Structures are given as C-alpha cells and as structure tokens.
Amino acid sequence: MVLQSMKMLRVLFVAIAVLSVVPSAWSADLDSLRRSGAVGERYDGLAVARDGSASDFVSSVNAQRSKIYQERASKEGVSAQDVGKVYAKQIMSKAPAGTWFLNESGSWAQK
C-alpha cells in the first residue's frame, strides 16, 4: 500500500511538471473552449466535447493525454486509469472558471 502511494505521488509530481510545459497556443485554445462550455473535463483526465464542433479538437487532446498517461503508467507500474485520475485533479485545479467537470457518477458541475 505504501509503495503504491509513493508511486502515485511520483506520478502527481510528473503530472504537475508536464502540465506546466503544455504548449501555450494549445492551452489557450483549450481554455477558451472550456470557458465557452464547448469542452468539459472528466474525472479520469480526459476531455469531453460538450459541443459537436469541438469533437476533433477533443480527440486530439485526448490522444496526447492518453499517450502521456500510458507512458507514465508503464514507468510507475500503475494503470493508465490511475494516472489519468491523478492528472484530472491537476487539470481541475488549473482549469479556468466556467469549466464543466463530469464526475464518476455522471453528473456535471461547473467551476
């Protein structure tokens, strides 16, 4: 249990580092779409297209995130889903006001 917690803590620190170097143009587009409500965030660290016009953008974001989650999971010996949940907490804390979040029970809440 302690070993698992230590691994997840390392994942959290890496998540913070990765999120701090996200390309600014991509980040600006994502923030704009989140503020408008076209894109939301899920409990598992993936984005959700709340508006059909954002589907391609969200697919691209999720492909990049999934790759990062899988790479980190392989290095830390945890599941990609666990990594995504750690990243989700960081995403939520850094998301702009007005961002919609989908929790595990399927209900939406706005920041």
Image (cartoon, grey):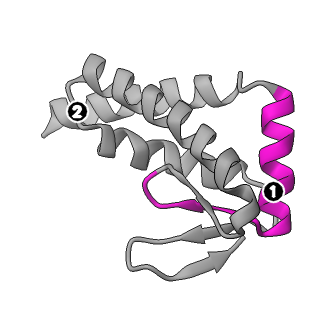
- Left or right: 61 with respect to 38? left
Residue pointed to by mark 2: 78
* Above-or-below relation of 59 to 42: above
Asked whether 28 or 54 is in front, the reply is 54
Per the picture, the main secondary structure of the magenta-coloured stretch is: helix
Where, by quadrant of the figure, is residue 41 drawn?
Answer: bottom right
Badge 1: how crowded within 10 Å, few (<14), some, or many (20+)? Answer: many
Q: Nearer the viewer, mark 1 or mark 2?
A: 1
Q: What's drawn in magenta, residue-wise? A: 24-44
Residue at 58% x, 30% y is 16
Residue shown at the point (38%, 79%) measured from the top left:
105
Which secondary structure lies at badge 1? helix
Residue tagged 1: 33
Distance of label 1 from label 2 (alpha carbons)? 31 Å
Q: Nearer the viewer, residue 52 or 21?
A: 52
Q: Position of residue 35 (x, y in %)?
A: 84, 63
**Residue 29 in the figure: left or right of residue 68:** right
